[in-house]
Image (tube, grey):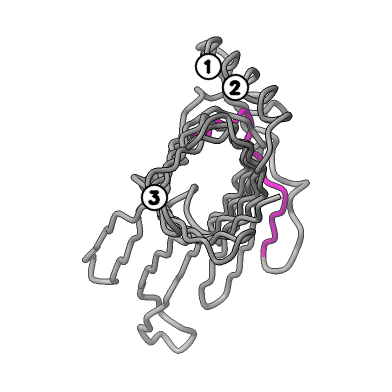
Amino acid sequence: MKKLIVLMLVSLAISIQAQDKYLSISGGYGIGVPGNEGVEIIEYSDGERTETVKYINFGSGLLLDLAYGAPIGKSAHFELGVGYQNNLGSTLESTFYTEHRNSANQLVEMKETSIRTINASSFRFAPGFRFMAGEGKTRGFAKVAPQLIIAQVTSTFEFNSNNLHVLSEDEYSREASFGFVASLGFEHNVSSRIVMFSCISGSLGYYSPDEWKFVKYEYDGEDVLDKIPLRDKQTYFSKEIDENANSSNASQATRSLKTRMDYSSISLNIGIRFLL
C-alpha cells in the first residue's frame, strides 16, 4: 500500500506539468453484488407461512462521477475521481393475516403489513490509472484505482393493521472504508476536444458502522421516542465487548459486536471527456 501511494504521488507530480489534461463526467446505474441478505414473510391465518430471501443492495443504484486526468505516458493517465452513489431505497415487505372476533362476535380476518425501506448513499474518492488501447477515433480503455468510500445507511419502518399504525426512522453512523474499483470500456472521439465513452465497472467495498439509533418513533401518530429506554433505541458496535457490557440498566445503550456489510456493485456507465 505504501509503494502504491508513493507511485500515485509521483504520478500526480508528473501530471501537473503534462499537457492534454481532461475533465470527465459520467453517470450510470449499478446492481449490488452479492448484497446483504434480508427476509420477506407472508403468514396466513391458517398457519401457512412463506419466507423469501431478498438481497438488500447498499452499493447499487444511481452513480455520478467526476474525474480529472493527465497523461503520464503515451497511453496512460493518472486520474483523480470523486463520485456519489445512492441506492434509491431497497424495501423488505411482510404481510400477516390473523383472525379476530368483532363486537358482534363474528370471526373476521385482519391484515397486518410491515414495510422497511433501507437507504444507502456514499461519497467516493478514487485516485488511479487509466490505460488506453488502440488507435483511431474508437479505442478501448481500462481503469484501476483504490477508493475511499464514505457511506451511511438509514431506514424507515412502517407497520399498519386495522387499528394500529407505527412509523419509525433509524440510522447507522457515517463511516469510511477502503475498497477497489476497476472499469473496462470503449471511447469515441466526437471532436478534437470531446470524447464519449461507456464502460462496465466493478466496485468492491464494505460498510462497518460504529453506532445505530432511532431518530423517530411514532405510535398511532404520537411521538414516543423519548419514552423508549435508551438500551432499546441505541446500539454501539465494537470489535470486542465484555460479557457484562449489557446490564439491566435501561438508561444505558446496548453494546454489540461490530459487523461488516457488503457495499459492492457492478455498474454500467456512460460519460463524456473534455480535453483541456
**Residue 159 on image: x %, y %:** 54, 65
Residue at (34%, 56%) from the top-left corner? 54
Mark 2: few/some/many CA within 10 Å (<14, 14-19, 20+): some
Residue closer to the observer: 7 or 102: 7
Residue type highlighted by circle 2: Met
Disc 3 and disc 1: Cα gap in Å?
Answer: 25 Å
* On screen, residue 137 above or below 145: below
Residue at (74%, 50%) from the top-left corner? 225
Let me know if residue 90 is in the magenta part: no
Mark 3: few/some/many CA within 10 Å (<14, 14-19, 20+): some
Q: In this rendering, which labeled residue sits more in front, label 2 or label 3?
A: 3
Of the numbered discs 3 and 1, the one sitting upstream in the chain is 1
For disc 3, the marked residue is 140
Of the numbered discs 2 and 3, the one sitting upstream in the chain is 2
User: Which type of secondary structure does the marked residue at label 2 adopt?
Assistant: helix
**Residue 23 on image: x %, y %:** 67, 49
Residue at (55%, 32%) from the top-left corner? 128
Residue type highlighted by circle 3: Gly
Residue type highlighted by circle 1: Leu
- Counting the numbered discs, the total is 3
Residue at (36%, 71%) from the top-left corner? 98
User: Which type of secondary structure does the marked residue at label 1 adopt?
Assistant: helix
Q: In this rendering, which labeled residue sits more in front, label 3 or label 1?
A: 3
* On screen, residue 122 above or below 188: above
Residue closer to the observer: 234 or 208: 208
Q: Which mark is residue 8?
A: 2
Task: Name the quadrant containing residue 149.
Answer: top right
Mark 1: few/some/many CA within 10 Å (<14, 14-19, 20+): few
Q: Which mark is residue 4?
A: 1
What range of the chain is rendered magenta? Answer: 206-219
